[in-house]
Image (spheres, helix red, strand yellow):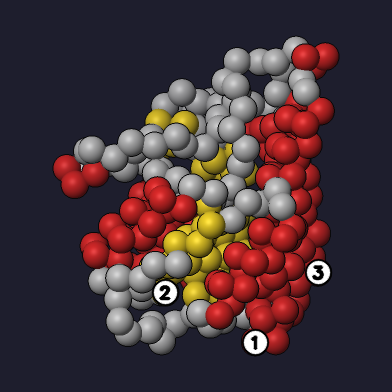
Amino acid sequence: MRSMASTASPKGIAAIVGVGPKLGRSIARKFAHEGYTVAILARDLGRLSRFADEIAREEKSQVFAIRIDCSDSRSVREAFEGVLSLGFVEILVYNAYQSIPWLPTNFTDIRIDSFEKSMAVSSLGAFLCAQQVLPGMIDRGKGTILFTGCSASLNGIAGFSELCCGKFALRALSQCLAREFQPLGVHIAHVIIDGVVGPPRGPSNSQRTSIGEQNIGGSTNTMDPDSLAQTYWHLHVQDRSAWTQEIDLHPSNFIPRFS
């Protein structure tokens, strides 16, 4: 874990799981900007530590980098021992996904281990992470869990069964948890990113490169991750009399697809 600040935030902890150079980093920066102590989690600890240093320096906040393998229950448990030692996790953003080829894969050519890994990262990891933070949220009667989905969360797509199955399961998990825990004060929402996530806009972000969220079958117009992060923040601060459970985000030139 790494911190660039010496004083703790009076707010809770924002845990962002699956932080790469695009959306995850923008979400972490947004919550740091709003005064939260932020824990960022991913597999590549070296890159993660650089992000933590950068965000902490820019936002004058505490940012901790913690390694996690979302497909491994022991890794998730150990990672969240570190996160929970920082304090109450007020918000969990689950943004992890397993990279897959952009070109369709013939179903009979998909390896079992690849399919299992995609399912584990997309859905099992979300299940494990949510189990770690929900007890504290229930005890306090507040908290937010946001799951990142994509266009493959809604429609099966030929050649992308390993992605679609994992994302379908993630969407089902978000709906089950919402029905069980929203009456107890925990806001749970599923965010469908229906577009290619590009690098943040603006002169200060011109050198940032990233891998982005999968967008199979969606728009080819890029989406600004800083703008997307604003929506994650909006979901967190929504009044509980008007909570969103699922939201579909897409570029302005989006053409709706009907099932």
Residue behind mark 1: 140
Mark 3: which amino acid?
A: Glu
Q: Is residue 61 left or right of residue 163?
A: left
Q: Is residue 122 left or right of residue 223?
A: right
Q: At which x and y percent is residue 208?
A: 29, 40
Quarter placement of the C terminus: top right
Q: Is residue 46 above or below residue 76?
A: above
Q: To which quarter of the image does residue 248 belong?
A: top right
Residue behind mark 2: 37
Crowd class of label 3 (few under 14; some 14 to 19; many from 20; radius 10 Å):
few
Calculate the distance from the C-alpha at mark 3 to the C-alpha at mark 2.
28 Å
Task: Say which of marks 2 and 1 sits in front.
Answer: 2
Q: Earlier in the sequence, mark 2 or mark 1?
A: 2
Q: Earlier in the sequence, mark 3 or mark 2?
A: 2
Residue 57 visible here: yes
Calculate the distance from the C-alpha at mark 3 to the C-alpha at mark 1.
16 Å
- In the picture, the disc for residue 51 is none
Identified at 31% across, 43% down, the residue is 200
Calculate the distance from the C-alpha at mark 2 to the C-alpha at mark 1.
18 Å
Q: Helix, strand, or loop for circle 2?
A: strand
Residue behind mark 3: 180
Identified at 44% across, 82% down, the residue is 11
Identified at 62% across, 27% down, the residue is 100
Quarter placement of the N terminus: bottom left
Q: At which x and y percent is residue 95?
A: 56, 50
Crowd class of label 1 (few under 14; some 14 to 19; many from 20; radius 10 Å):
some
Task: Say which of marks 3 and 2 sits in front.
Answer: 2
Q: Nearer the viewer, residue 187 or 110?
A: 110
Q: Earlier in the sequence, mark 3 or mark 1?
A: 1
